[in-house]
Amino acid sequence: MIKIFLNGCNGKMGQVIVDLVDSNSEVTIVAGADVVEKQYNNFPVFTSIIKNNIPADVVIDFSNPLAFNDVLTYCQNTNTALVMATTGLKDEQLAKLQQVSLTIPVFFSANMSMGVNLVMSLCKQAASFLEDSFDIEIIEKHHNQKIDAPSGTALAIADSINKSLEQPKDYIYDRQSSRKKRSPNEIGIHSIRGGNIVGEHTIIFSGHNEIIEIKHEALSKDIFANGAIKAAIYLNKQPSGFYTMNSMLKT
């Protein structure tokens, strides 16, 4: 059985993972960490991953970018595989993940949903065909407690589109500050926050007299938790290296 250390175990996503692991015979959570010191779980909970002294096979991190350095330090010092599921990481943090993957297995995805990653693949294919004659806009919707905007998933979708284009486009987040016509050399990214929306991403390809939309709607946080658990199971069998959802889907 694969032993998981869950960083961010008392958060909303952490608790979803705890519930799903309880019904999964391949994995178990041996310990966790959270800045919230309440004991919701039947495993030891530390205030920091650095304080953990219980061996684990894989760390799943669903916490906060502020905990990033401690997570990397722990995984390197203990030679523990890492599933990084925290969103809102900066470019320099992503570069550190790549560097750490030279010595331990690291799995990273801006979104742990397999459906979202399929959407990215479809968008890449569509963009390569429609680049010259269609405008591209991305609308993302999330609950009113989400801190980062735009979402990491929206940016990942935009990045995947840009990689398929002969001429990469600029990201435009705010048109209010500039009164001018839309440039063909841009991807508009718009954020909506309200209620308890789990997550919705719509990619619009707008051409002359026709519109194509690709949409993904998350109805439950279970899809992200299941993806993280599957990533932990997958990563436990891998040597050091940098792995993504595409890596796992190809196996």
Image (spheres, grey):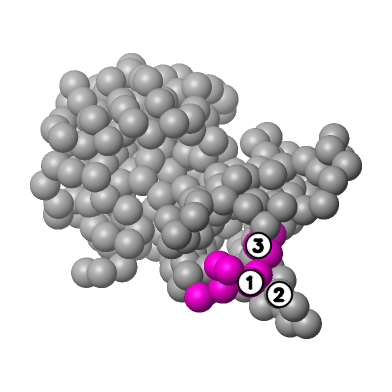
Dot 3 amino acid type: Ile
Q: Is residue 208 above or below residue 189?
A: below
Q: Residues within 10 Å of mark 1 (few under 14, many from 20)?
A: few
Q: Is residue 170 visible?
A: yes
Q: Looking at this view, name the residue that lies furthest to the top.
A: 51
Q: Which residue: 37% across, 20% down?
A: 69
Q: CA distance from mark 1 to mark 3?
A: 10 Å
| Foreground pick, 126 / 73 | 126
Q: Is residue 77 above or below residue 233?
A: above
Dot 1 amino acid type: Ser
Residue to which mark 3 is pinned: 136
- The percent coordinates of residue 52 (x first, y second) are 30, 23
The range drawn in magenta is 129-137
Residue to which mark 2 is pinned: 207
Q: Which residue: 30% across, 46% down?
A: 107
- The percent coordinates of residue 226 (x first, y second) are 43, 60
Mark 1 residue element: loop
Mark 3 residue element: strand
Mark 3 or mark 2: name the one nearer the start of the chain. 3
Mark 2 residue element: strand
Q: Nearer the viewer, mark 3 or mark 2?
A: 2
Pointers 1 and 2 in contact (CB under 8 A)? Answer: yes
Is residue 18 toward the left or the right of residue 29 in the image? right
Q: Residues within 10 Å of mark 2 (few under 14, many from 20)?
A: some
Residue 65 in the magenta stretch? The answer is no
Residue 132 in the magenta stretch? The answer is yes
Quadrant that contains the N terminus: bottom left
Mark 1 or mark 2: name the one nearer the start of the chain. 1
Mark number displayed over residue 115: none
Mark number displayed over residue 133: 1
